[in-house]
Every structure is written in C-alpha cells, then in structure tokens.
Amino acid sequence: MVASLVAMGFSENGCRRACLATQNANVEVAMNWVLEHMGDPDFNDPPPPGFGAPPPAAAATAASSSGGNADAASPEEDGVGTYTLHGFVSHVGRNTASGHYVCHLRSADGSWAIFDDQKVAQSRAPPLRLGYLYFYRRDDAPAVEDP
C-alpha cells in the first residue's frame, strides 16, 4: 500500500504514517488521510518506533506470565527441525504466459505422482529443480489422518 501511495507522488514517510493511521484499511482511505495531513509539520518525519503496532501476542503472554520480567520468561524450545519434501508445483510450457502448472506429490512409499488437470500419472523423474512452490513437512510433526 505504501508503494501505491508513493507512486502517486507522496513522500514515503507520509505514506507510512497514513497506512499506520488508517490501519492499512485501503489505498483510498490512506490517500484521503495523506491529503488531510500533508500540511502537518511532522508529516515527512519517520513514524516513531512502534507507532500503531500492538505488541505481538506471544510477547504479551510471556510478559504477563513472568510479571513483566523478560529475563524470567522461558524461551520456547522447538529443537532442530528436519524436513522432507512432500510435493511441489512446476510449470509446463515455454514461459509463464503460455502453458500451465502441474503438481508433483510424493506418496507414502516414496514414489512420485504428477497431477496434470484431469490426469494423474507416475512421475519417474520429477523436475525438482524447476519447482515454483515447494511443500515440506517437518519430520517430527504429528501424523495427519485422511479425512
């Protein structure tokens, strides 16, 4: 949203202030705020740190559970994560303006399948390097049951 307002010729700091003041409602609301406040003496100043941002929920919970003492809050230990590739989306065609996207998924036995519109087939050599979007699953995550 800031970029859209800056493209209209307004200053970046003023646009940031507008987005914060309007809680990122939409470009039109932010533009109206800019037009109403562009004469303010602090309009082009950088927004103050933390202006308009509520504290993150995790930080608020940690602060309340430790009496506000950040050092007393216990850090969440997630351990070392290892992930396995379970699928990816790739493009078939000369360029993104022509062709279409297909999905490759790994089955429980480790073999790959390609989902191409109405066709599903075994994928003997999936083009792993040509993916646009990759789907990983954490190895120690709880099992997901079929619906």
Image (spheres, grey):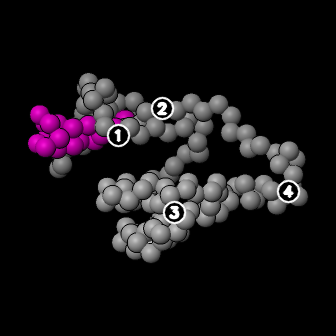
Q: Where is residue 114 shown, x and y percent of the image?
A: 25, 38
Q: Is residue 147 found inside the magenta-colored segment of the image?
A: no
The residue carrying mark 1 is: 133
Tag 2 near tag 4, CB within 8 Å:
no
The residue carrying mark 4 is: 68
User: Which segment did they paint magenta?
Assistant: 88-106
Kind of residue at badge 2: Thr
Q: CA distance from mark 3 to mark 2?
A: 49 Å
Q: Which label belongs to residue 43? A: 3
Q: CA distance from mark 3 to mark 1?
A: 41 Å
For the residue labelled by badge 2, is the local secondary structure a helix, a strand or a loop?
A: strand
Which image quarter: residue 103? top left
Q: Is residue 32 left or right of residue 96?
A: right
Q: CA distance from mark 2 to mark 1?
A: 14 Å
The residue carrying mark 2 is: 84
Mark 4 closeness class: few <14, some 14–19, many ≥20 residues within 10 Å: some
Asked if residue 90 can be seen in this view, the reply is yes
Mark 3 closeness class: few <14, some 14–19, many ≥20 residues within 10 Å: some
> Which residue corresponds to the image point at 14% horizontal and 36% vertical from the top-left?
95
Kind of residue at badge 4: Gly
